[in-house]
Image (cartoon, rainbow, N blue to C red):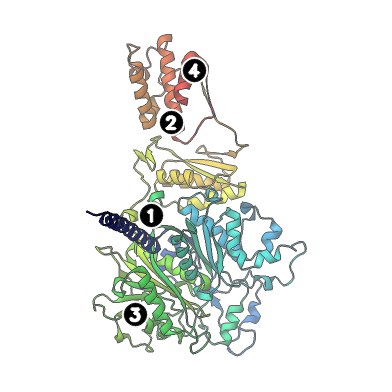
Amino acid sequence: MTATEDRLREYLKRVTTDLSRVRTRLGDLEAASTEPIAIVGMACRYPGGATSPEELWRLVEQERDAVGGFPTDRGWDLDGLYDPDPDATGKSYATEGGFVPDAFDFDADFFGISPREALVMDPQQRLLLQTCWEALERAGIDPSTLAGTDTGVFAGAISSGYLVQLRQPPAGVEGYLGTGNMASVVSGRVAYALGLEGPAVTIDTACSSSLVALHWAARSLRARECGLALAAGVTVMASPSAFLEFSRQRGLATDGRCKSFAASADGAGWSEGVGVLLLERLSDARRNGHRVLAVVRGSAVNQDGASNGLTAPNDLAQERVIRAALADARLTPADVDAVEAHGTGTRLGDPIEAQALLATYGRNRPADRPLWLGSVKSNIAHSQAAAGVAGVIKMVSALQHEVLPRTLHVDAPTPEVDWSAGAVRLLTEAVPWPAGAEPRRAGVSSFGISGTNAHVIIEAAPAAEANAEPTSDDSADVTGPAVLRSELLPWSLSARTPAALAAQADRLAAAVTGPARPLDLAWSLATTRTVFDHRAVVLAGDADSGRRVLHALAAGTPDPAVVSGLAGASRKVAFVFPGQGSQWAGMAVELLECSPVFAARIAECEVALSAYVDWSLLEVLRAGTGLDRVDVVQPVLWAVMVSLAAVWRACGVQPAAVVGHSQGEIAAACVAGA
């Protein structure tokens, strides 16, 4: 073989190796760009008392209508607001909508905000801040641990009209009016309060804002701009301007209700709310042990462009955004079972949306597998910038409960649509949606009056993640062997003020239901909540007793099962081991029975002592004999202290010092500190 051939062989080897590396790198990049995004936390507040995803699901499942009269606490001129004439200036021909009763309530002290600043803060900032905190805690993440991390905030929001409604702000609030009402600060306030250093972006594409926020949050996660992302939408109607404007356009339903895709549809009904999703790359969620509620498989955003009107929907643009989302998810239309529609109930918008769905999802489907179509707006009306995320929360819950709920107010499918053009069916009745061999999926649509369209495809969590719940077996803790087995378990609560502590106890009591397991609650309260100075511990044996004691704590009624107080300054912990004379017959017997950690350490001590003593450590402890002998009591106390230290360590207590009072205890200190 010539030298030239040798060089050629080496060159080909290098080229082959380089091509293999490039191919691997390209594969990694493609996988990263299409990795499913896990939804690991959700929180919300919507009309009808839907203060949590569970309450929103109950509202939908029970087919309740959350629309009601205008609020009386916002300074609206209710008597002068109504006029049945749609041409009447400054009037609304509708008198009902969907409202969040406590939308203006805010615990400013909790976030370290002064009363003056809080007063002129847009209620959308307040509501989003509180709900983001809840979403993190519901995901099992202590919000205070995220300071300095690259967590992102992507918030959809539109103008609330709060600054206009203030008219003449009170004296002394200068300097707060700007930051309190800037759209950019809606997301920035969350990042500032929690110390988050990832992207913080406020998005206003009108009614599609929250789904656009979700789309860009997923993109940011895949690009590794952030490790966690809060994707949200919020709308608070501080003024009645939305009702006045749509009355002029004759786009408002006279009764304030969205009759999605119905023959009787007569316009949109307005509402408000906030919804927050906590997102994480699926691989990271698995590695971090976060429960996956569902995954975002794909999403897309586009624009109507030049169409038949600035505010008029465009069916071709809607078709394109759906196809783009399917392509992003690497799916076909037949892979999707249902669509949570925009479905505002307008005579123009609904038929156009239905036609786009028929043209995309409805073609080439088996007749026995139609695309099921519904909208949560039939329950809570159109919550504007918070509407898309409401649809996502509804569909995640539907996946978990394996049923597609009924859409309200459909007297008959709108005759403006040729429903025979494809296999699309309205959810006029609830339909079972059981898990099967193939993953279940749903599309969620939002179309902004600005012309910006968004479509997101949600998929059921992989089976392992969907079934992953904190272990509630009495013999095991979520993180390993149980520290203690006991009929009573500590439920720990903390707050910044006594009033907030009482309110938290009241809320927890309301949330504790029959199937709630004391161990799960004890673990979650101890490990996933930020600890504040005002603290209480409730000893609960079961849900009923825990609820009773929580009510006592909330009411300020003394109860032997409650320990409460004000924490002092943070100090280092020292383990002090007592000397001879602290023993008693029967000591440690109960711990041997109820603490596997203690029992395991005692067993190790017995093995360590066996070469030096002619008695059994376990027998001495259980029988209580021999404790009057110095050569017995000191080794026994040593073993008990070492084992008790192991229990404290298993509870998360790490001592800065370990101190003993005798040679035996000094030896114990050395062992415990090892």
Q: Which mark is residue 283?
A: 1
- Residue under the image location 38 percent in, 12 percent down: 626
| Amino acid identity at mark 1 | Ser
Assess disc 1: are there few (<14), some (14-19) or many (≥20) residues with their C-alpha within 10 Å of its C-alpha.
few
The CA distance from mark 3 to mark 2 is 60 Å
Q: Nearer the viewer, residue 3 or 499?
A: 3
- Element assignment for label 2: helix
The CA distance from mark 1 to mark 3 is 31 Å
Residue behind mark 4? 666
| Amino acid identity at mark 2 | Val
Residue behind mark 3? 360
The CA distance from mark 4 to mark 3 is 76 Å
| Amino acid identity at mark 4 | Ile
Residue behind mark 2? 647
> Which numbered disc, 1 or 3, marks the residue that appears first in the sequence?
1
Q: In what quadrant of the picture does the C terminus appear?
A: top left
- Position in image of residue 648 (x %, y %): 46, 31
Q: Quadrant of residue 656?
A: top right
